[in-house]
Amino acid sequence: LYEGDLIVVGPGGFARGREGLGPALAARARSGMRALILEQPTLPGTLSEDLRLWPSFSRSRENAVVLAPDHPLLLGLSRDEGTGFFGASPAGIRPLLPPTRGNFRIIAQERLRSGPSWQEGVRVLEFVIGDGVVLMAQSSLCSDYGRDPRARILLANALAYLLGERPG
């Protein structure tokens, strides 16, 4: 793995057959490395046993997006722009199940009514592994980069945030 300031795992980086990347990335994170993980179809349990993708996530027009207030990742976007972007995530990019324990912060979450209860899918999650920080984005930051300025703002903010710079 890269030995610089940041590791980026692009779309499909954890595709089937590449599960061996999980323990290596977790070891680097525990030693203080920062990582950005983008648009994954699967997640190895060897990265963190608490990270899991929804097996299927229903879409409806009644979805609601909840954003963390004042997080640096969201600088430069109005609340409507942020909720619009995360609420329009393609169906092929499954959100994370909300973690139940550990040191984490949900930055963007999509909620859908499912009968008498809610489905909650995490679109952006920040979590700590050892001395490192991992930012996981299960939204279309890469696939929409060329056509949606919100994706460019969010990706630039994510990189600046993880590298310790002030976005914007």
Image (cartoon, rainbow, N blue to C red):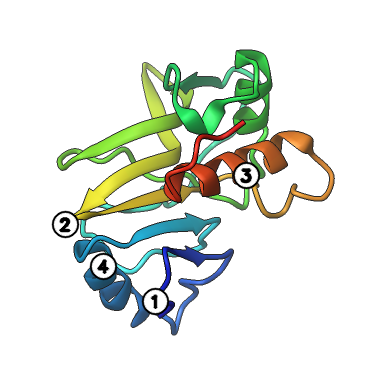
Q: Residues within 10 Å of mark 2 (few under 14, many from 20)?
A: some
Residue picked out by circle 1:
3
Comparing labels 2 and 4, the label whose residue is closer to the camera: 2
Query: In the drawing, does residue 74 fall left or right of residue 128?
Result: right
Check if mark 3's residue and mark 2's residue have beta carbons within 8 Å: no
Q: Which amino acid type is marked by label 2?
A: Gly
Q: Where does residue 15 sit, x and y in percent of width and height? A: 50, 74
Residue picked out by circle 3:
156
Query: In the drawing, does residue 9 fall left or right of residue 151?
Result: left
Residue at horizontal 56%, vertical 35%? 167
Q: Where does residue 112 sit, x and y in percent of width and height? A: 49, 24
In which quadrant will I find the N terminus? bottom left
Q: How many circles with numbers are drawn on the protein? A: 4
Q: Where does residue 46 sit, x and y in percent of width and height? A: 24, 70
Q: Which amino acid type is marked by label 4?
A: Ala
Residue picked out by circle 4:
26
Q: Secondary structure at mark 1?
A: loop
**How far apart in space, not on screen, are marks 1 and 3 (Cα)?**
21 Å
Camera-side residue: 4 or 80? Answer: 4
Check if mark 2's residue and mark 4's residue have beta carbons within 8 Å: no
Q: Which amino acid type is marked by label 3?
A: Ala
Among numbered discs 2 and 1, the one appearing first in the sequence: 1
Check if mark 4's residue and mark 3's residue have beta carbons within 8 Å: no
Q: Residues within 10 Å of mark 4 (few under 14, many from 20)?
A: some
Q: Which amino acid type is marked by label 1?
A: Glu
Among numbered discs 3 and 2, the one appearing first in the sequence: 2
Residue at horizontal 67%, vertical 37%? 153
Comparing labels 1 and 4, the label whose residue is closer to the camera: 1
Among numbered discs 1 and 3, the one appearing first in the sequence: 1
Among numbered discs 1 and 4, the one appearing first in the sequence: 1
Residue picked out by circle 2:
130
